[in-house]
């Protein structure tokens, strides 16, 4: 075999390996994309208990300790319009909406309106320092195990649920809620 034939066979062999490596690389990339796509899909929900509450559904009951040291339950407020606000002190939009919630609560609490501010996973000292520094007057509940966050299938803070006097969720809002939204959503329920 001549040197030229050997060089030609090595070149063909190198090209073949190059094509095989490219094919393997493309296959691995496609497999990775497929795995990421499948991981992003949520499993089918088979239990009705795992279904997120939404407009028109009865709000799930929960008991939580309050910052004042009592156990507070959603059922304690039957017959009232309840705004459940899930928040944390590290969350800028949560902190920004608190004065609006407090003002609306103070103006409407005598009409059967209550705000239950459910703090997610923070200790009582951190929460108490924040509440005392700002003088908020609505009930503060401590959800150190994210019980309500999980039950209500909350994915972001702040999230607000407005519940009518019959215990049915009328409105769900993710993000900072405004005075105008409170007047439009809560006002007609009072």
Image (tube, rainbow, N blue to C red):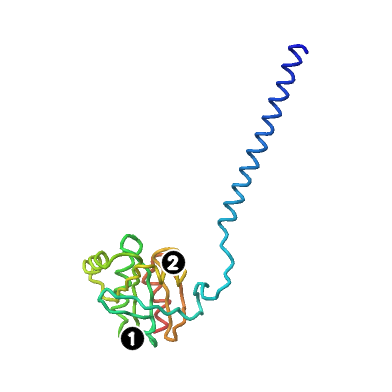
Q: What SS does tag 2 mark?
A: strand
- Quadrant of residue 46 in the image? bottom right
Residue under the image location 27 percent in, 66 percent down: 127
Q: Which residue is mark 2?
A: 174
Task: Note whether 93 is above or below 185 in the view shown.
Answer: above
Q: Position of residue 104 (x, y in %)?
A: 32, 76
Q: From the viewer's perspective, is the residue at label 2 or at label 1 nearer?
A: 2
Q: What SS does tag 1 mark?
A: helix
Give the total of numbered labels: 2
Q: Is residue 97 left or right of residue 18?
A: left
Alpha carbons under labels 2 and 1: distance apart: 25 Å
For the N terminus, the quadrant is top right
Q: Which mark is residue 35?
A: none
Q: Position of residue 171 (x, y in %)?
A: 46, 75
For this orientation, the residue located farthest to the right is: 1
Residue under the image location 76 percent in, 15 percent down: 5
Task: Note whether 34 is above or below 51 in the view shown.
Answer: above
Q: Is residue 117 left or right of residue 26?
A: left
For this orientation, the residue located farthest to the front is: 1
Q: Nearer the viewer, residue 23 or 177?
A: 23
Task: Note whether 16 is above or below 50 in the view shown.
Answer: above
Q: Position of residue 74 (x, y in %)?
A: 38, 81
- Which class describes the residues within 10 Å of circle 1: few (<14), some (14-19), or many (20+)? few
Query: Which circle's residue, 2 or 1, is located before the other in the chain?
Result: 1
For the C terminus, the quadrant is bottom left
Q: Position of residue 16 (x, y in %)?
A: 71, 29
Q: Which residue is mark 1?
A: 111
Disc 2 to disc 1: CB gap under 8 Å: no
């Amino acid at each position: 075999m001549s040197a030229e034939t050997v060089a030609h066979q090595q070149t063909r062999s190198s090209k073949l390996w190059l094509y095989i490596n490219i094919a393997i690389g493309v296959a691995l990339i496609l497999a990775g994309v497929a795995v990421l796509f499948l991981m992003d899909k949520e499993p089918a929900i088979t239990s009705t208990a795992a279904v997120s509450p939404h407009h028109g559904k009865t709000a799930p009951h929960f008991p939580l300790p309050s910052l004042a040291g009592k156990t507070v339950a959603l059922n304690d407020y039957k017959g009232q319009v309840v705004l459940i606000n899930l928040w944390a002190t590290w969350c800028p939009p949560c902190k920004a909406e608190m004065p609006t919630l407090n003002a609306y609560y103070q103006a409407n609490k005598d009409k059967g309106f209550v705000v239950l501010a459910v703090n997610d996973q923070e200790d009582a000292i951190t929460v108490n320092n924040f509440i005392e520094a700002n003088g908020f007057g609505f009930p503060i509940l401590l959800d150190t195990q994210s019980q309500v966050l999980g039950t209500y299938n909350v994915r972001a803070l702040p999230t607000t649920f407005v519940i009518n006097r019959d215990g049915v969720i009328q409105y769900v809002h993710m993000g900072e809620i405004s005075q105008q939204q409170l007047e439009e959503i809560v006002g007609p329920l009072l």
